[in-house]
Amino acid sequence: MKIIHTLTLVLLLHFAWAQSPGRVIKGTTIDNATGTPLPYTSIGIPHKSIGTVSDSSGQFTLTLPPDHPLTDSIVFSHVGYESQAKRIDGLLRQVSAIRLQPSTNSLSEVVVKPKITKSKIVGRNGKGLSTFHYNFYTASEKSVDDRLSKEAGMLFELKDECRINELNFYISGNEFRSLKFRVLFYHVKDGLPTTPMFDRDIIFEIKDGYRGWFKVDLKPYQLWVPGEKEPFAVTIQWLESVKQQANSKYFSITTAKSAFKTFAGRSKAMDSWSTDKQALSFYLQCQCL
């Protein structure tokens, strides 16, 4: 009987530990120069599926597993600002505003070029039979907040120098009254996205459960890609959502298996990238020299 009681106690302790909510870090991201809140700052631990984004007021909540090493650092990153890393143990001792410094080195310049000669579409501009879907929801995610900072997109190549005018994608499922995403462009090395190409903060909203082809107008941002078949990645990052109903969870884009096109995604802001041979219904409309 003693053995049974001991085993029962161990199992109960293990269950209680597994149910522990973990360590919670809360704070606000702000502009160090102006003191104003920085909405939708990407926050996470590099190469790990732990991350989030700050909300429209710059406030954030990041939950860590109870046994996560306190010596790890959390990285705070925002387009147009210097990234900042802070150790977990320091953040747990003192919750305060995270002040990000505006970047002094612009990643790119706004360039207006003449003699745009031809229109070009890059990517999959059809939805096929709409039998396969990339869904932002997975079974491991318990709430919509689990998807904050998740990214998904495609790798592209362009032979000529082009201005990117539009991003278009086909929404096959949408159970949200409002969704906000950020468009991000990345350089690619060894088949994976690396550093951002531009310092424009491109945020768009999808309203009222919209389904079908959705266009993001990029012309105001003057985004020039150099071409010469240098690969680059374009993703959309989940920032904010409002459900249509309490149990709403699905948002999906049509996709298809492909031997030649590459999907790129990651589950959290600073997580490692993964790729797959599939083609989202996700394309760029460009004007090329």
Image: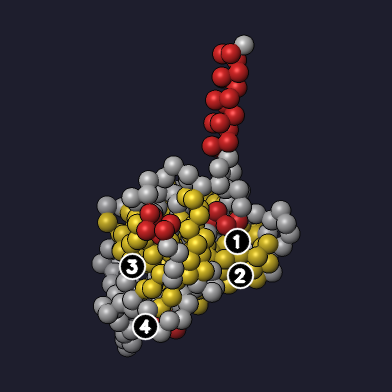
**Dot 1: what SS?**
strand
Mark 2 lies on a secondary structure that is strand
Disc 4 versus disc 2: distance between alpha carbons? 32 Å
Amino acid carrying label 1: it is: Ile
Q: Position of residue 27 (x, y in %)?
A: 48, 66
Which label was assigned to residue 83? Answer: 3
**Residue corresponding to mark 1:** 171
Judge by depth and name the residue closer to the eye, 48 or 220: 48
Distance CA(mark 3)–CA(mark 4): 15 Å
Residue 5: where, in percent of width, then height?
A: 60, 18
* Amino acid type for the residue under numbered disc 4: Ala
Relative to 171, 81 lies left or right: left
Give the image's coloring scheme: secondary structure
Which-is-in-front pick, marks 3 and 2? 3
Residue under the image location 27 percent in, 63 percent down:
230
Residue in the picture at 37% in, 79% down: 32
Q: Quadrant of the C terminus?
A: bottom left
Of callouts 3 and 1, which one flags the residue occurring earlier in the amino acid sequence? 3
Residue 265 shows up from this direction: no
Q: Residues within 10 Å of mark 1 (few under 14, many from 20)?
A: many
